[in-house]
Image: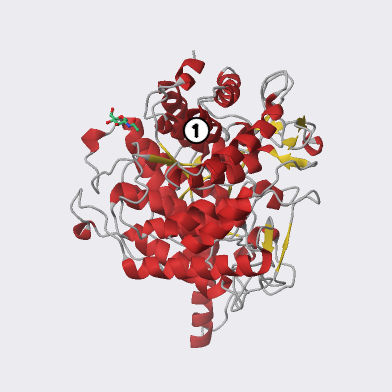
Amino acid sequence: MARRKDAQKPPAKAPVAAPAQPARPAASKPAKAPPPRRPSPLRIVFLCFRISLCAFALYILYNRLHAKPANKVKLDTDADVAPPPQPAAPTVDDEQQPAAFEPIVRDQERRDAILQAFKHSYSAYERDAFGFDDYHPISHHGTNMSPAGPVGYFLIDSLDSLLLVGLDDEYKRARDWVANVNFDLDDKFHTFEITIRVLGGLLSAYHFSGETDQVLLDKAVDLADRLLPAFDTPSGLPTSFVNLAQRKGVPDVDNNGLTSVAEAGTLQLEFKYLSHLTGNDVYWQKVEKVMDVIRNQPSKDGLVPIFMRPDTGSFVFSDVRLGSRGDSYYEYLSKQYLQTNRTEDTYRDMHDLAMGGIKKHLLKKSAAKNFVYTSELLPSRNPMTGALCQDHLACFLGATLLLGATDGNRLAVPPDETQFSEAQRDDWYAGKALIRTCVDTYASSKTGLAPEIVNFHLSPLKALQTNRDWFINSRKPGQAGIAQPPIDARNILRPETVESLFVAYRVTGDPVYRDWGWRIFLAFTAHCKLPSGGYAGIRDVDRVPVVHEDRMETFWLSETLKYLYLLFSEDSVVPLDRYVFNTEAHPFPVFEPSRGAAGARA
Ligand SMILES: *[C@@H]1O[C@H](CO)[C@@H](O)[C@H](O)[C@H]1NC(C)=O
């Protein structure tokens, strides 16, 4: 999800982790000892101590020199991957795996607990901020993104979750608000954010209403028609913003009018589904054109820079990353293939190419525990280096790899490898390994919650000293208690890890994914739940007691709690072979483009 994420990020990332310098650790300074005159027992002990110090120093030097992460990560088997995080997480025990295709049954008790958390969150929003775009649960009030009025950012984002978890009265009240929402707002709104949250929320709620509530579809059409002018650029790539009342695209002046590849490549599921529902091909054509523009650019093994120019349709020399501004482009390739019931091979091919590029260029293994993680390429900074950091946002990739390897079908655990192509097999193991890493970013923090961005140690020694393979940037020893923790240390209730756990559980049936998800839920409840209602993000995942931020993000209800609820549901609830989730966790049904839409692709 979430690429909005960018708005939340610090304007500039903290500097890239420097390549390992074989710096001399303080311990490697053996003092010049005068020759002992008379060996006393004390002196012998002291000598032994010195000798061990020297040995230790040599060990450090050795590690420093060998600390370069491997360029290419080999993903052979589970044995190749570090054990699951300890002690917080249970171990995977093959003996205890369920038989390959036993149906997934509901865990009633845990699902009820998730439902209670959902009620605790939504009822506070309804009480304090009903209809507002953003909710501040500590000061008990709502705000809108624009003075022009609310756009349904929070409320519409929650609609299909209300239906899924069965809060029917709450749904009725929210739906009546939607019937009166006015999208004729004279201000600029983010094309991508409005599409994934508001358009996506309307379409998904329309589907789960039994495709009968015409008001929802009419609102979706009205909103989409106001978004369409964003695509009126020479290349067909959308502008980042659009004025909904004036129906005019508005370039992103803060980024020289550039559009990011995630913004342009994460509109397709929504607009294509709208074409399918209405029979009007124009939505389909606009977003398909965007994919043509991207497809026709040179890419490096399917990897693309994050910025593009709407005037020329070309890539701009910029970073390659799976975090903000890159992420959901990679998520939507296989999902476009799945959405039209696997009829468009071009998206399967783009997905396979991109996953190959990710495995070749971006996956690394951590220094001590061999956790597989995603790095970034930063050609704009230094063509030779990348950043060894991973956004929490990048944790969507585990789900993307597993979905791509299985097409959403259930597989045995361990899988029958004859079912796989070599690339699928690699995707399968890489996906599982990444999920384990993401779970460790929760399990190894003080609160059990993951920070916004982790950096990986280059030196195994550092990892051993701190007992974890990653650290939070700008964190200095003993600094955990300061009033202003580094911005990377926050947790703002993001969904990507539980999203991956949900997909992994559905395609494997392996109970370890439910256990991990449950631990994460307990940590959210322990640290983010507010007694007066709502859940709030925290400033520093390594500090207890926590300091809350006065904000409950919309994706807490639309994504995080939805994925947790589905994790503990039976697999006939939103089955993965019949639904695709948009990047904001709004499920759309799979369809075959039999109407005009298919023709539009000629
Ligand atoms: C998708 O394709 C499968 C196999 O060809 C078919 O059984 C199924 O009905 C199709 N689903 C939809 C929604 O068209």
Residue that appears at 37% across and 28% down: 342
Q: Position of residue 415 (x, y in %)?
A: 24, 43
User: In the picture, residue 242 is in which quadrant?
Assistant: top right
Q: Position of residue 446 (x, y in %)?
A: 54, 71
**Camera-side residue of 76 and 583:** 583
Query: Taking 231 as reference, is 502 left or right?
Result: left
Q: Position of residue 81 (x, y in %)?
A: 37, 50
Residue that appears at 40% across and 43% down: 430
Ligand 1, seen in the image, is in the quarter at top left
Q: Which residue is mark 1?
A: 273
Examine the rendered structure and indicate whether residue 67 appears above or below residue 469. Answer: above
Query: Taking 535 as reference, is 589 left or right?
Result: left
Secondary structure beneath disc 1?
A: helix
Task: Assess disc 1: are there few (<14), some (14-19) or many (≥20) residues with their C-alpha within 10 Å of its C-alpha.
Answer: many
* Number of marks present in the image shown: 1
Q: Is residue 553 visible?
A: yes
Structure colour scheme: secondary structure
Instruction: Determine the residue located farthest toward the top in the rendered image.
Output: 602
Q: Position of residue 88 (x, y in %)?
A: 41, 69
Residue that appears at 45% across and 35% down: 335
Q: Is residue 494 visible?
A: no
Residue type at mark 1?
Answer: Tyr
Query: Taking 260 as reference, is 592 left or right?
Result: left
**Camera-side residue of 210 and 458:** 210
Examine the rendered structure and indicate whether residue 345 appears above or below residue 449. Answer: above
**Camera-side residue of 442 and 589:** 589
**Camera-side residue of 191 and 211:** 211
Query: Taking 493 as reference, is 516 left or right?
Result: left
Residue that appears at 44% across and 22% down: 595
Instruction: Determine the residue located farthest toward the bottom in the rendered image.
Output: 41
